[in-house]
Amino acid sequence: MSRATLAQERTDTTALPDSPAPKQEPADSRQRAPEKSSGQRSLELIARRSWFYPDLARTSGPLTAGEKFKLFLDTSMSPPQILVSAAAAGISEARGTLAGYGQGGEGFGKRFGSSMASNASSHFFGTFLLPAALHEDPRFFVRFNGGWKLRVGHALKRTLVIRTDEGGSRFNVPGTLGPLLAEGLANTYLPDSERTAGKTFERFGVRIAFGAANNLLREYWPTIFKNLRIGKVAPGLKPDSNLPVQP
């Protein structure tokens, strides 16, 4: 066979679509593929950062340890923490609890400061330290779809179940152990009458109950502002934001 004939055959062979190149999928599609599995339900992510609730998830994750630390700082100084601490200080002074702090402006200031400190330490353990060590995601993923039973159930479930960095779910160790560690630490600066095991677990129970109620508000926070049509305040939904992630 002549060299010319061999060259012609090679040319004809390479011209045929025998082995088409595999279709290249966008990088985002390839990254999301591992998250799709049976039993996963669709949640929606918000488009803009919520200044009121900075821990509302805007991406499907995961967060780096540095991002979890920044989230701890943002959440510790968020409006809910300030408002709750101010309200708790006022109620405590009116009822005469934490008597060791006294009354008046000084007593209110000490009560407010101790409440802010315990909230911050709870977020330090529950939003940064434990999630970073255990590779868990401390953010709240809003479930916009479904009826109120599904949404309320999702919010309450978040008290006991946390999303992992890989997209799975497990028992919420940061959400339970974090507040307990914070209340134990609070015994170093609270009045002597509060430094008992009974008082510590009582405050821990109140913190867990408040966390569950706060999750309900987180779940409906974007919906509330959407219905009020306050576009500049509402976090809003991302276009095509149905992502298959674990609730």
Image (cartoon, rainbow, N blue to C red):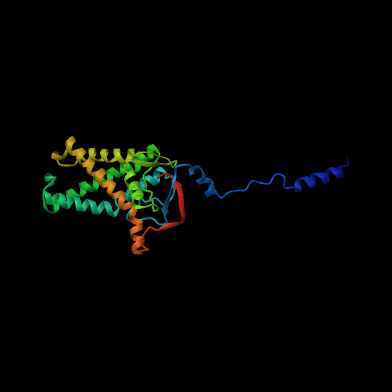
**Quarter of the C terminus within the rendering:** top left
> Is residue 233 something one can see in this rendering?
no
Q: Residue at x 22, y 44 (%)?
A: 206
Extreme residue toward the right, this view: 2
Rendering quarter of residue 170:
top left
Residue 235 at x, y = what percent?
38, 58
Query: In terms of image quadrants, where is residue 174?
Result: top left
Left or right, residue 37 beside residue 151:
right
Q: Give the x, y percent position of residue 187.
A: 20, 39
41, 158: nearer the viewer: 41
Residue 219 visible somewhere in the drawing: yes
Q: Quadrant where the N terminus lies? A: top right
Q: Is residue 176 above or below residue 77?
A: above
Residue closer to the observer: 124 or 157: 157
Picture residue at 18% right of the left edge, 35% below the top? 197
Name the residue at 35% across, 62% down. 227
Residue 47 drawn above or below residue 160: below
Residue 139 appears left or right of 107 = right
Q: Residue at x 42, y 52 (%)?
A: 44
Q: Is residue 100 left or right of residue 35?
A: left
The x and y percentages for residue 176 are 29, 39
Count the marks.
0
- Which of 114/25 is in front? 25
The x and y percentages for residue 101 are 13, 46
Which of these two is toward me, 142 or 5?
A: 142
